């Protein structure tokens, strides 16, 4: 194996990893190791998961506050850390605040515990989302301010556990969700007008996330000799349901979140869905397309069209909103409405939504006005899981069905060098996963 891996604490289950987190946290609390809370102008940041999105979040955090410093990084692969640190150090005007000595570069499945125990004030949780509930619970127990990349998890049990942990944790700690469209300037302007009645009450939303595969699964023949099942799946995490949640959950969850936003965050009561796979994906077990049909108690409907299929000529990532008095269209960085007052369009955004959400996080820490977004993050993730369950089973799924399922996909034992069978792809007509 070419990449260096730390094997310390490599064997774990969700329960044993949380037990380890609790012990580490007790020691941390006993030392009062909260530098910023004691008056320092420096805010120390720990990055957990330093792929492209994690490194991007770290750069946004540095840009958000002149006193923000990256002081610890954790990942399962040493080269990922080296690449991330190297790239962050090259950022003009920011690189000097990347101060991660070798002793604070942690490798392995338990690296998140070491980052939490390193004296950081804020953690950026950016690993594959299968690990998100575990990391949220540990970070809450350690008393950290948290940025959690979307989605909140890949199964019902994990999302609910993370939501409960934040609710029971310190109320003076911020929890920022990675559903970044909620901070985009065009989107905030659009949904404000929508909720004020510019095109009347929302009657229907059609959301699309039609694109190509994110990280296609390589053939089994390309797997290096001696590489374990666990390492193989984590390296190709986007192709396994327990790690990525499927395309509807990992990627199109943004569109699900915007549907919920249009509905004023009122939850649907029921959904049905179609889905499957039309292009082979070697050993992967995720669908490459789903169409979900959500229903609300008042009869309002929404559809979510998601696909990740290669070599198609048409892609679309747009939300089409129909009100009683007009229509609206929401694009990646712009939006418009046509209603009784004529046509309205948003202005060009001045900052990216990624930067704006981190600006808000660090402002909340400086002002001691914590952001608390865990409940909203949980609802949007669970709404996506509701659609996936309907597509995977072919059944009509109510919100109560979803919650009572307590779907749990996280492996019971997880060792970096261990065996882990690949679950078969879901077949509609059969029971739900987990």
Image: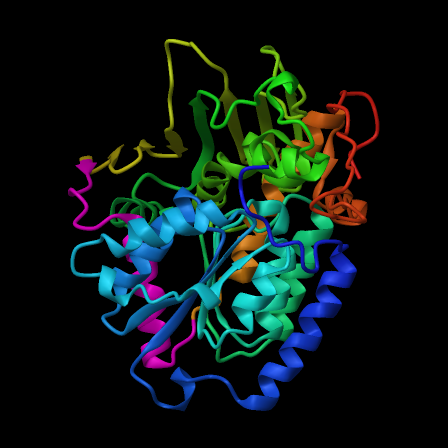
- Tell me if residue 69 is in the magenta stretch: no
| Image location (x, y in percent) of residue 367 | 32, 80
Q: Quadrant of the C terminus?
A: top right
User: Can the viewer see residue 195?
Assistant: no
Q: Is residue 244 above or below residue 16?
A: above
x 55%, y 77%: residue: 143
In magenta segment, residue 352? yes
Q: Residue at x 54, y 61 (%)?
A: 374
Judge by depth and name the residue closer to the eye, 335 or 108.
Answer: 108
Residue 173 vs 246, above or below: the answer is below
Horizontal and vertical percent position of residue 329: 32, 31
x%, y% of residue 341?
Answer: 20, 38
Compared across the picture, whether 16 is left or right of 60 comes to right
* Relative vertical location of residue 181 with respect to residue 285 in this rendering, above or below: below
- 251 or 269: nearer the viewer: 251
Where are the magenta residues, as a range? 344-370
Q: Is residue 74 left or right of residue 267?
A: left
Q: Looking at this rendering, what residue extends furthest in the right direction?
A: 431
Q: Position of residue 101 (x, y in %)?
A: 40, 66
Side (left or right) of 91 relative to 223: left
The N terminus lies in which quarter of the figure?
top right
Quadrant of residue 205 in the image?
A: top left
Residue at 62%, 51% (x, y): give it: 131
């Amino acid at each position: 194996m070419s990449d260096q891996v730390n094997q310390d604490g490599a064997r774990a289950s969700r329960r044993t990893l949380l037990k380890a987190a609790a012990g580490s946290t007790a020691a941390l609390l006993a030392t009062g190791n909260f530098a910023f809370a004691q008056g320092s102008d420096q805010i120390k940041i720990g990055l957990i998961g330093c792929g492209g999105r994690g490194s991007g979040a770290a750069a946004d955090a540095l840009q958000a506050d002149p006193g923000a410093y990256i002081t610890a990084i954790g990942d399962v692969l040493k080269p990922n850390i080296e690449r991330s640190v190297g790239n962050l150090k090259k950022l003009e005007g920011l690189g000097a605040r990347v101060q991660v000595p070798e002793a604070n570069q942690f490798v392995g499945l338990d690296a998140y515990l070491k980052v939490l125990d390193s004296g950081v004030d804020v953690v950026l949780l950016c690993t594959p989302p299968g690990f998100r509930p575990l990391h949220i619970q540990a970070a809450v127990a350690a008393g950290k301010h948290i940025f959690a990349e979307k989605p909140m998890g890949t199964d019902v049990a994990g999302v609910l556990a993370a939501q409960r942990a934040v609710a029971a944790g310190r109320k003076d700690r911020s929890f920022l969700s990675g559903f970044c469209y909620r901070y985009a300037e065009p989107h905030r302007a659009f949904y404000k007008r929508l909720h004020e009645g510019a095109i009347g009450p929302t009657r229907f939303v059609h959301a699309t996330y039609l694109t190509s595969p994110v990280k296609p699964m390589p053939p089994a023949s390309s797997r290096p000799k001696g590489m374990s099942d666990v390492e193989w799946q984590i390296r190709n995490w986007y192709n396994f349901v327990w790690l990525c949640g499927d395309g509807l959950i990992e990627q199109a969850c943004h569109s699900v979140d915007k549907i919920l936003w249009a509905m004023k965050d009122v939850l649907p009561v029921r959904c049905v869905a179609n889905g499957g796979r039309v292009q082979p994906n070697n050993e992967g077990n995720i669908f490459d397309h789903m169409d979900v049909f959500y229903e609300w108690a008042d009869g309002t409907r929404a559809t979510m069209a998601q696909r990740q299929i290669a070599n198609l000529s048409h892609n679309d990532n747009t939300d089409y909103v129909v009100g009683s008095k007009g229509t609206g269209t929401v694009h990646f960085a712009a939006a418009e409405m046509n209603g009784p007052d004529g046509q309205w369009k948003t202005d060009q955004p001045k900052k990216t939504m990624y930067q704006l959400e981190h600006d808000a996080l660090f402002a909340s820490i400086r002002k001691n006005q914590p952001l608390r977004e865990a409940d909203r993050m949980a609802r949007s993730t669970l709404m996506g899981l509701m659609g996936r369950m309907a597509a995977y089973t072919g059944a009509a799924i109510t919100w109560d069905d979803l919650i009572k399922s307590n779907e749990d996909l996280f492996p019971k034992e997880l060792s970096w060098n261990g065996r882990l069978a690949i679950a078969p792809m879901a077949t509609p007509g059969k029971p739900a996963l987990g």
